[in-house]
Image (cartoon, grey):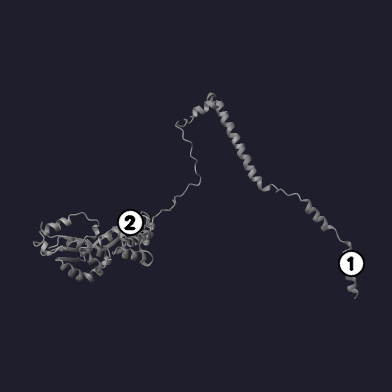
Amino acid sequence: MSDSEEETKQNTDPVDNAWSLKIPAFRQEDNPHGMVEESSFATLFPKYREKYLREVWPLVEQCVSEHQLKAELDLVEGSMVVKTTRKTWDPYIIIKARDMIKLMARSVPFEQAKRVLQDDIGCDIIKIGNLVHKKEKFVKRRQRLIGPNGATLKSIELLTDCYVLVQGNTVSALGPYKGLQQVRDIVLETMNNVHPIYNIKALMIKRELMKDPKLANEDWSRFLPKFKNKNISKRKQPKAKKPKKEYTPFPPSQPESKIDKQLASGEYFLNQEQKQAKRHQERSAKQADAAKKQDERRNKDFVPPTEEAPSRKRQAEDSSSSKVDVKALKAKLVKANKKSKS
């Protein structure tokens, strides 16, 4: 068996950790005949990015020319175009260049966006605008993803080795493919009301557990934090709750018709004059009742209030205060006379 056959046999064996595999480099010798057709991709950019793109476009053209590509900037239409040339030999580089201009249109700086042209670096644009219906909740959860002074976003970048940018209704991520998968999970769970700190803690714990070879084949779920949703429904409850009736298999009884009620009361058998007399009697009784209530309401202001009967204790106090102490009064008068004589 030759060496080349042994190598191919080793490559086809099952792999325990696919992330540890290195992507083989694609060289010009692998595709000496170049491309058969010319491919091009265009993307629009917002008006506020025009000034920045105009400044960095010479650098963009220089960067894509290294990969035998061509780039065009149309300021009138507001679009960026990347094209293959006859010298282009890498069939996938045009897809990478398309991702680069997409990232630049979404406010990613050129210094970061050009990294996507490398083989082991990818990008992911996560749309978060439709995940939350209410705008207030959407803004709060998006701010939760950024954190105070961008601390949460920075910690996500350090743990996943990715560049992450939150812009409007999208989150742009750029980095290794494993890190992109982790960033997407964190972003989607954050928009589904799971705080990013739980996922950040889990990533930190996993990083420490990876260092221990003894735990390589064990389940790590017992070490990871478990999130429990404690949110109580804030739906407005009705003031008067109707008690639920007991379940019965029989349908409710049919309501009585007008004729049934007349038959029960005997009114059905009365003639026209008797019916009219009864109706007049009911009306007059109703009017008399209303007049009585009206008189009561009018005379309410003229009814004297009820006075409380004085208690025995208070009567005793009043009688004691009404008695005059004769001796004390006599002594007082004598004293006053002495003063006047002197």
Image location of residue 341, percent across then percent down: 91, 74
Q: Residues within 10 Å of mark 2 (few under 14, many from 20)?
A: some
To which residue does mark 2 refer?
188
Image location of residue 115, percent across then percent down: 23, 66
Q: Amino acid at mark 2?
A: Leu
**Residue occupying image coordinates x 17% and y 70%:** 62
- Where is the C terminus found, in terms of image quarters? bottom right
Q: Residues within 10 Å of mark 1 (few under 14, many from 20)?
A: few
Q: CA distance from mark 1 to mark 2?
A: 101 Å
Along the line of sight, the residue nearer the viewer: 76 or 84: 84
Image location of residue 313, percent across then percent down: 78, 53
Along the line of sight, the residue nearer the viewer: 210 or 142: 210
N-terminal label among 1 and 2: 2
Along the line of sight, the residue nearer the viewer: 197 or 220: 220
Image location of residue 11, percent across then percent down: 17, 57
- Badge number at residue 331: 1
Left or right: 65 with respect to 181? left
Q: Amino acid at mark 1?
A: Ala
Quarter of the image for residue 120 reads bottom left
Left or right: 182 with respect to 251? left
**Dot 2: element:** helix
**Residue occupying image coordinates x 50% and y 27%:** 260
- Where is the N terminus found, in terms of image quarters? bottom left
